[in-house]
Amino acid sequence: MTPDSLVERLVLCGTAPDSEIALLAKEAGLQRLTGALVDEVLFRCEQPVNTTPVDIALEVTHEQELRRTVLRMAAGEPIRVLDADDPTAVIRRHFRFSLTDLVRRLYGPLQQPHSRDFTDVFLPERPADLTELPQILQATHQAGGTLLSGCTSDAPGLGALSVAYGSDKWASFHWYTQHYEHHFARYRDRPVRILEIGIGGYAGDLGGPSLKMWKRYFHRGLVFGLDLFDKSALNQPRLTALTGDQGDAAGLRELAERYGPFDIVIDDGSHENEHVRISFDVLFPHVRPGGLYVIEDLQTAYWPRFGGTAGAETAPDTSVGLLKRLLDDLHHAEYDPKPDTPRTATQEQVIGVHTYHNIAFVEKGVNGESSIPAWMDDEAWKALGAITPEEGRELGASR
């Protein structure tokens, strides 16, 4: 069982019967599962605020087995996992979860009550120097809150996450997260697969702030990023950086067949209009029914240096031109006269096109709504007691 497949099964266990968690524990072993769960907890933890360093034991039990991980927390430092035999460890607090309860906390539905699902031992041993007791009490309390902040599926809104991780999707040149939250809300509790084109990062910076934001927001999601440059140093559980060119149709197709299908695809790549069209044409077929394809930074449709059109109206080969075509495809049932050619994939599968300033969301589904029957003529309208189209035109002209 690969690390990626282990994490994916853990995610699915969040809403599966207890027997599925027990089966995974039998196959993978409690030690491996505990390691994966600790990785997830550390990713979700808030930054420590305790100025006095504190060691906390996070214990996971299953049947008669127990696995302990000791974490050292101190303000201004990353949370450290100590070696099992570290002689400097002074454990101030024990948190103990059953494997099932911790899996439910991390990968279960959002906003579920989790009271009384763990045991807590506060200051198991008397401090050697009682003059330090006030600082130790405060620091242990703060560190416990930090740990529990990572043992939950709940997360701040996307605006706060964007700022926390350094994504430019909010409070920069863009104000996208309000639209993302509107369209992504229904996916938050699902084990979604997300592909974002464009990882970012310049002058040696690996980038990846948006990928981390998506990982935190979609607590059951698997997040993939695509970039021209190797950013695999960003790889971690539930987050994979892929290398490729969004203008390479064959490469995109191979990627989608290997890692898809996707519930959400986000194009925040080169913003070259040709690349936007190529990526959409290749990847939209690999979006699951009920999924979304998002195109950011539509302003380049008006910028000739990105292959856009100067002036007030964009050409068909731009990103905005693509959206105009999709609006026509959405309404293919209304064409008059009906074309003799077979319907295209987007005519059959685009069920919504939502556009905002510089960003658009394309919904995928079955575009099977019928139109008014073609045989409805004046005689049929009169049989319904309705005004015929011709009478409507004459009435309008007389006003």
Image (tube, grey):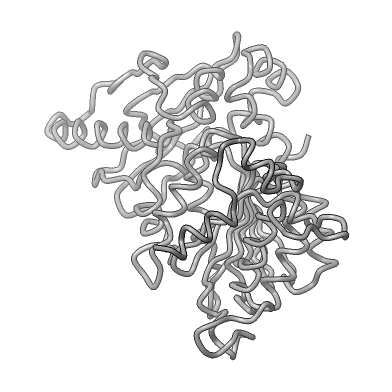
- In this view, 125 is above or below 328: above
What is the x, y in percent for residue 6? 70, 34
Q: Is residue 327 left or right of residue 83?
A: right
- In this view, 9 is above or below 274: above
Q: Identify which residue is drawn at 54% across, 66% down.
A: 296
Q: Is residue 4 left or right of residue 60?
A: right
Numbered label tally = 0
What is the x, y in percent for residue 165? 42, 58
Q: Nearer the viewer, residue 178 or 383?
A: 383
Q: Nearer the viewer, residue 208 or 324?
A: 324
Q: Is residue 224 left or right of residue 94?
A: right
What is the x, y in percent for residue 76? 32, 54
- In this view, 116 is above or below 146: above
**Quarter placement of the C terminus:** bottom left
What is the x, y in percent for residue 240? 66, 53
Q: Identify which residue is drawn at 66% across, 62% down.
A: 328
Quadrant in which residue 390 is drawn: bottom right
Quadrant in which residue 132 is drawn: top left
Q: Nearer the viewer, residue 343 or 1?
A: 343
Q: Nearer the viewer, residue 34 or 393?
A: 393
Q: Identify which residue is drawn at 26% across, 32% down.
A: 140
Q: Of all residues shown, which one is farthest toward the top?
A: 64
**Quarter placement of the N terminus:** top right
Q: Identify which residue is drawn at 75% across, 48% down.
A: 374
Q: Is residue 224 left or right of residue 185?
A: right
